[in-house]
């Protein structure tokens, strides 16, 4: 996502970096953090007017895995230190006015809807902490390889208990939990990375969704659970 902008002009004394997909959720927070730290940022964004296939299979998860494998292998072949970060469910306030898939996940829990979901151990990380981890790895000398960014976890049922005042998903629509998989962010912590408490991240996300109007009626349409999260 971030890399040195070789040959790019930068203000005197500033390091120039390039952030690809700079309009995305994590990337936009990374850009904000980089600017606050005195970097000169060059961002790339996709052309919203460009034609593309609007009805396709859901390749999201496969694309994530494949692109990381290709990048790491290419780095090994040419002797380049490639650093990747693997965040879990990214929550936290957005810098965009559009409800993204991660926010849709939380909105569905609070509003309820017709879709059945599996109970599982949801690993959560704050988007602001992901941006901090990216900058930490960028600046850390000798950093290389994969870094899991999944410091906190909560079950679907426990998440519902945090906000009893909302209509909430019917607990009967949540399937049983099977084989909860623990994760660790020890590689990041060893580099000095720290993160917000889970409760703060969820509270900030809910507050943002309330202020943005995401928890109101969306033109009479039923709230739907993002299908990608039932495939994980």
Image (cartoon, rainbow, N blue to C red):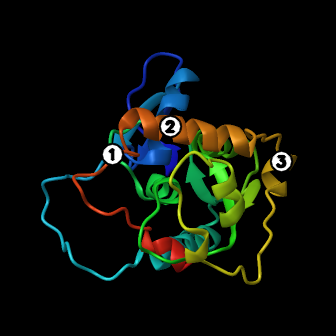
Q: Foreground: 224 or 66?
A: 224
Q: Residue at x 52, y 35 (%)?
A: 207
Q: Residue at x 69, y 54 (%)?
A: 161
User: Which residue is labeled 1 in the image?
Assistant: 98
Q: Foreground: 97 or 2?
A: 97
Query: Is 118 on the left or on the right of 154, as rendered?
Result: left
Residue 9: assigned label: none
Spot occupied by residue 208 in the image (x, y as percentages of width and height): 48, 36
Q: CA distance from mark 2 to mark 3?
A: 20 Å
Q: Earlier in the sequence, mark 2 or mark 3?
A: 2
Q: Earlier in the sequence, mark 2 or mark 1?
A: 2
Q: CA distance from mark 2 to mark 1?
A: 15 Å
Q: Foreground: 99 or 183?
A: 99
User: Which residue is labeled 3 in the image?
Assistant: 189
User: Which residue is labeled 2 in the image?
Assistant: 29
Q: Residue at x 65, y 74 (%)?
A: 119
Q: CA distance from mark 3 to mark 1?
A: 32 Å
Q: Earlier in the sequence, mark 3 or mark 1?
A: 1
Q: Residue furthest top?
A: 12
């Amino acid at each position: 996502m971030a890399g040195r902008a070789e040959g790019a002009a930068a203000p005197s004394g500033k390091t120039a970096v390039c952030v690809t997909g700079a309009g995305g959720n994590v990337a936009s927070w990374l850009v904000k953090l980089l600017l606050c730290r005195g970097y000169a940022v060059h961002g790339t964004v996709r052309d919203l007017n460009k034609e593309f296939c609007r009805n396709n299979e859901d390749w999201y998860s496969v694309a994530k895995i494949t692109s990381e494998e290709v990048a790491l292998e290419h780095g090994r072949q040419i002797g380049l230190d490639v650093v990747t970060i693997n965040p879990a469910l990214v929550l936290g306030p957005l810098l965009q006015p559009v409800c993204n898939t991660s926010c849709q996940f939380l909105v569905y829990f609070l509003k309820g809807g017709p879709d059945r979901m599996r109970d599982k151990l949801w690993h959560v990380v704050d988007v602001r902490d992901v941006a901090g981890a990216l900058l930490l790895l960028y600046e850390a000398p000798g950093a290389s390889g994969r870094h899991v960014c999944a410091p906190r976890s909560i079950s679907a049922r426990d998440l519902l208990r945090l906000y009893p005042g909302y209509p909430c998903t019917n607990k009967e629509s949540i399937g049983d939990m099977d084989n909860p998989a623990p994760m660790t962010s020890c590689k990041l912590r060893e580099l000095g990375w720290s993160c917000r408490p889970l409760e703060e991240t969820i509270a900030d996300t809910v507050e943002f969704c309330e202020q943005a109007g995401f928890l109101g009626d969306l033109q009479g349409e039923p709230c739907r659970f993002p299908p990608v999260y039932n495939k994980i």
